[in-house]
Amino acid sequence: MTARASDRARYDKATAHLDAPLAIVDLDAFDANAADLVRRAGGKPIRLASKSVRCRALLERVLAKDGFAGIMSFTLAESLWLARSGFDDVLLAYPSVDRSGYAELAGDPKLAAAVTVMVDHPAQLDLIDAARGGGREVVRVCLELDTSLKLLGGRVRVGARRSPLHSPAQVADLARAVTRRPGFRLVGIMAYEGHIAGVGDSVAGRPFRSRAVRLMQATARRELAERRAAVVRAVRAVAPDLEFVNGGGTGSVQHTAAEAAVTEIGAGSGLYVPRLFDNYTSFTGRPAALFAMPVVRRPGVGVVTVLGGGYPASGAPGPDRLPVPYLPEGLRYDPQEGPGEVQTPLLGSPADDLLIGDKVWFRHAKAGELCERFDVLHLVEGDAVTATVPTYRGEGHTFL
């Protein structure tokens, strides 16, 4: 029996009493992935990206482990909810225009001490001040550096369009604006290199593209390491008590951790290891988060139909954004239909061994987005479900 066939047998046995659709997290794989992230971070703490987990119980499980410290959140409402729930170090990784949230933050000492907000333009400071509503708490601020690689005098850009702050001088100017402004304290810098951490460099069947990606990433790492160090020097000249410099992502943990200027690493998707992480040479993880759909039809030889499954991931549309049939091995989509909202035909010889009511196990293309589809996660240890915990959705929250 192959390792994947063994996993299927375990998952089927563990969930035999549960009707699909359902989602699981294999805790043995989850914990092994967490340990590998810590190993690659080389002693620097990992700030846990909550959008990649979206389950409070699993956030707590990870943060109880050595090597993890703090949360990187994705909306202000989520940040405040996590802080009210007892998480005391929450970095909001994206700018917000949530006026009611800022009023709540500025009016509550506990929340103001726990949450750090993201800024990359003076207009965001204006909005926060206008939204305070009488609240006088000091707002903790982090500045985001644009990590994109610019070539040919800026005519070619590689990387996400995030912050407008690209040069040390630009970041230092905004740092001065924050430090001179009453009611704010500059505490950190964040620089997420998505074109390095979030792009696979070993795509099956595409050797030339994979080599091009590796070349781009090597160039980008060198450029960013020099520029990030210069940015940190420039900002520390303005704010010597800077608390943290955050960088990285699951795909670049060890490279970013090697930079002396970086004090902590942001990561989260590497805990679940969705299908997009199959295309990396920098690490190998164990798929930990899966969902099962039930077989509801057998239309003919070599084909079964499962209920639902059309859960595409965010990003540029393409086949790599689709979930992938994982167990049993050898199933594939009908190219004329793909994964459907209500039904998904699956082709391949393993279909002939599946009966009505059997489970087909899938992996999502990305990590936490799976939790927007399910109210609970069944936690599997060995061949048993040992706990069932709510996702954000299961607690009544869809933050974005």
Image (spheres, rainbow, N blue to C red):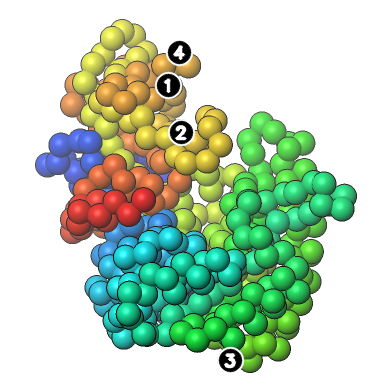
- Camera-side residue: 348 or 119? 119
Q: Position of residue 209 (x, y in %)?
A: 73, 37
Tell me the SS state at disc 1. Answer: loop
Looking at the rendered structure, the kind of residue marked 3 is Asp
Looking at the rendered structure, the kind of residue marked 4 is Gln
Q: CA distance from mark 4 to mark 1?
A: 6 Å
Marks 2 and 3, the one that precedes in the sequence: 3
Residues marked 2 and 1 touching at CB (< 8 Å)? yes
Tell me the SS state at disc 4. Answer: loop
Instruction: Classify residue 264 as left or right of residue 324.
Output: right
* Closer to the eye: label 3 or 1: 3
Instruction: Classify residue 324 as left or right of residue 281.
Output: left
Residues marked 4 and 2 touching at CB (< 8 Å)? no
Q: Which mark is residue 289?
A: none
- Camera-side residue: 129 or 218? 129
Q: CA distance from mark 2 to mark 3?
A: 45 Å
Q: Which mark is residue 241?
A: 3
Dividing the picture into quadrants, the one containing residue 229 is bottom right
Dividing the picture into quadrants, the one containing residue 264 is bottom right
Looking at the rendered structure, the kind of residue marked 1 is Gly
Pick out the residue farthest to the top: 300
Tell me the SS state at disc 2. Answer: loop
Pick out the residue farthest to the left: 17
Query: Which residue is pictured at 28% across the width and 28% down the height?
Result: 308
Residue under label 2: 322
Residue under label 4: 336
Marks 2 and 1, the one that precedes in the sequence: 2
Residue under label 1: 338
Q: Residues within 10 Å of mark 4 (few under 14, many from 20)?
A: few
